[in-house]
Amino acid sequence: MSAKTIPMYKRPEGLTDVRTHYCAGCGHGIVHKLIAEALEELEVLDRTILIAPVGCAVLAYNYIEVDGLEAAHGRAPAVATGLKRALPDRMVISYQGDGDLLAIGTGETIHAANRGEDITVIFVNNAVYGMTGGQMAPTTLEGQKTLTSPYGRNPADVGFPIRACEVLDTLESPVYIERTSVHNPASVRKTKKAILKALKYQKDGLGYSFVEILSMCPTNWGVEPVTGAEWVKDAMMPWFTLKKFRDRPEEKKEEKQAS
Amino acid sequence: MSKTLLMKGNEALAEAAIIAGCRHYFAYPITPQNEIPAYLSRRMPEVGGTFLQAESELAAISMVLGAAAGGVRTMTSSSSPGMALKQEGISYIAGSELPCVLVNVMRGGPGLGAIAGAQGDYFQATRGGGNGDYRTIVLAPGSAQELADFTIDAFDLADEYRIPVLILADGYIGQMSEPVVLPEPTGKTFKKPWALTGAKGRSKNIIASMKLIPDTALEEHNLHLQEKYDLISENVRRIETYHTDDAEWLIVAYGTAARIARKAVDRLRAEGVKAGLFRPLSLWPFPDRELYELARNAGKVLTVEMSLGQLVEDVKLSVNGAVEVDLYGRAGGAVPALDDIIERIKSYERENHTHVQAS
Amino acid sequence: MTEELIIAGFGGQGVLLTGRLLCVAAMRLGKQVSHIPSYGAEMRGGTANCSVVISDEDIASPVIERPSIVIALNGPSVAKFEPRLRPGGLLIWNSSLVKQAPTRSDLVLVSLDAADRSLSEGTERAANMAAIGALLKLKPDIVPMEAVEAALDEVISARNRKHNPVNLRILHAGYEITKTINAA
Ligand SMILES: Cc1ncc(C[n+]2csc(CCOP(=O)(O)OP(=O)(O)O)c2C)c(N)n1
């Protein structure tokens, strides 16, 4: 390999130079970095507000060099709605985990998407409630053992893991919906592209964009970090297909011009 | 007698709920009460019960409403921010006169606050955090053993009075492991002819908090509830006193704060200061008459709480101006320091004060 | 007798279990005990710890501001808890892992190659046992060795009980190699 092709990774300007509180092998840090890079590339660091969820990423605003806001558990899309409507020319990111987005905040999730709020939702799906110590999440896989599904998730009792992208894809308003993953370098690069696109659409005022990212939680899965990455591929990806569900900026642009 | 076990407070409570015959439990995860759902997710299937992790506290409390209407013993647990969400359902349950047990293992606030133990939800618990004119019985355990014992009591009280009973513990009580002897069931049974079991062989039952017709229906309902609350106020007054007979100083505290206050009483007595502890075990109804008598005899009252002036309001209402009341409060997960309590009282003693400075 | 102990180390070093073991042993002798873990996000990274009170009297608060004894199984635990010990307190530290030795001159400092003792018995997981052994030697009035031996089977889950013979050997090794201290 020639020196030219070796990618040089540096700390993006938008990423705060501190140690995060995340466990070894956690995916949140990777996603933070991708968001920081994308915001830097779009030159919007100084007009972005990041809404941190209640979940392991509750301190996300300490790690990304943009304005940060806290929302109550599950309410980030509603808070984002209020903020964006108050400041339509700012970038608003709602960063959420699976418990936050698909359990306590299901209502907020669906209605913000349905209204086509001009925000970007970054959804980190790790199949478990991380912050509270590993309880069953709406995305916990069939048979997966957690603190509150000690016998394994039984769909006959608590239903199947919910697929957020597929649910949101039934709505008319969203401009962009994609599911990616961060379990290996190639998928990290794809995720970066997805985040960049989602934020670009927001920058262009095209409406609601949603990126779901499959991510690792070795601590609560009770595995080593390396095994965690494999588990995303072997256990999560068969159920949560990586796919672009929706991408229609042209339509949105036309709609926008018409109105 | 069953064996002494080293049990975490939260787990002692969870097992006691099973002993009390609770087979329907609904909750949403939140620290520092997570051991309760984790424990019951294992135990409920073993005893043929239902454990369901709800999608939110709003949902969990509504599930409790439904189960209670069906006539079964049911419980939910949470911690401070989650309890805030449950207030909607609690108001409906109170209005509908349904029995259930609620548990708040308090952490510090406001907002997301932090997960260390605190007592900042005293007002929310005792004043009714939801809308309307209603009450819930509030019990305040101070050890893992009491978490278990009070849970048994709570289910009986709930059924007897058709009322939500709240167990108000702070995070330290829930998280601490201590020796516990699991309680026996009381064996009390309660008829529930009002339960919604299907109108087979009887006229239909309706459970609702809305009262529209006639115009006076809601006030009548409120007056009926008030009568019930008056009755509870007479019957459910729980206290513990420690060295209060000859006390010249009365410390008032509950939960973890009371454990420390009790130690302060010992230390003060060893140094010749006649101190005593008044510990309300029911926070609603608040044992006001009992406190009034003891406070008047003592003359000097210090409230110790893990909040900054909540319990002290009930203390002042109880003594009704008869004596002044001082406050030592800590917040945000801090526990009252033994030495601070002692020093506060000794500084008054040194200066020969006849009464304390009102907080 | 009232001792207020903080036991601290990495997650996975058996910190909570160490505390429970001491509590159950003391409880079976009729003493008052309390055990409270550090919980939630506090546990991530750095140290896990628990506070244990063992007393002949009722226990006031399970929360310990100024411990009388600290068992520190890793470096961050020494850094965090050495300053909090009360003067005259006892600090047992794991010299196999701790790079920065404790320095306070008003403490009883006892170093113990706990992790190496554990490794020499073929396991990485029983440094805590060596530390308990040392504690029992240094503070015989908390609980006697027999009480801890008896509590092992009760505290360790059925799944892990097969390791108890090794645990016992390391427990005793910690006891044997530690010298008694004369109260100054
Ligand atoms: C009203 C309310 N209920 C419960 C909690 C406790 N809580 C904090 S984070 C969390 C779940 C987080 O899981 P997830 O959204 O999947 O994010 P992760 O931590 O896995 O990134 C819960 C239940 C809370 N803070 N507020």
Image (cartoon, coloured by chain):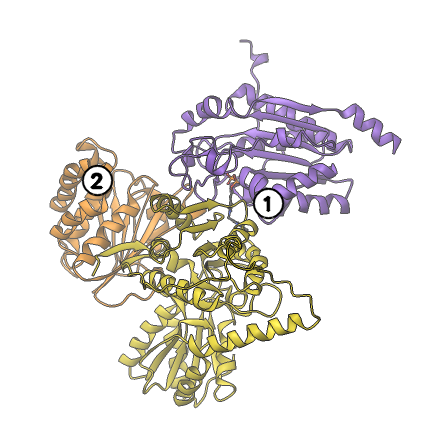
Chain colours: A purple, B yellow, C orange
Report in which chain the residue with disc 1 lies.
A
Residue at 48% from the left image edge and 38% from the top image edge? A158
Outermost residue, top side: A1
Residue C128 place in picture, x, y as percent: 24, 43
**Left or right placement of residue A133 versus residue C34 in this view:** right
Could you tell me how far apart the alpha carbons at marks 2 and 1 are, in whole angstroms?
A: 48 Å
Q: Is residue B346 above or below residue B214?
A: below
Q: Is residue B63 above or below residue A156?
A: below
A98 vs B197, nearest the viewer? B197
- Same-subunit check for callouts 2 and 1: no
Asked if the residue under mark 1 is in contact with the one under mark 2, i.e. CB atoms within 8 Å, the reply is no
Q: Amino acid at mark 2?
A: Asp
C184 vs B326, nearest the viewer? B326
Residue C156 place in picture, x, y as percent: 23, 43
- Identify residue for label 1: A74
Q: Is mark 1 within 8 Å of ligand 1?
A: yes
Q: Amino acid at mark 1?
A: Gly
- Identify residue for label 2: C113
Q: Quick check: can you spot residue A117?
A: no
Image disc number at residue B63: none
Residue B25 place in picture, x, y as percent: 44, 51
Q: Quadrant of residue C120?
A: top left
A160 vs B11, nearest the viewer? A160
Report in which chain the residue with disc 2 lies.
C
Q: Quick check: can you spot residue B21?
A: yes
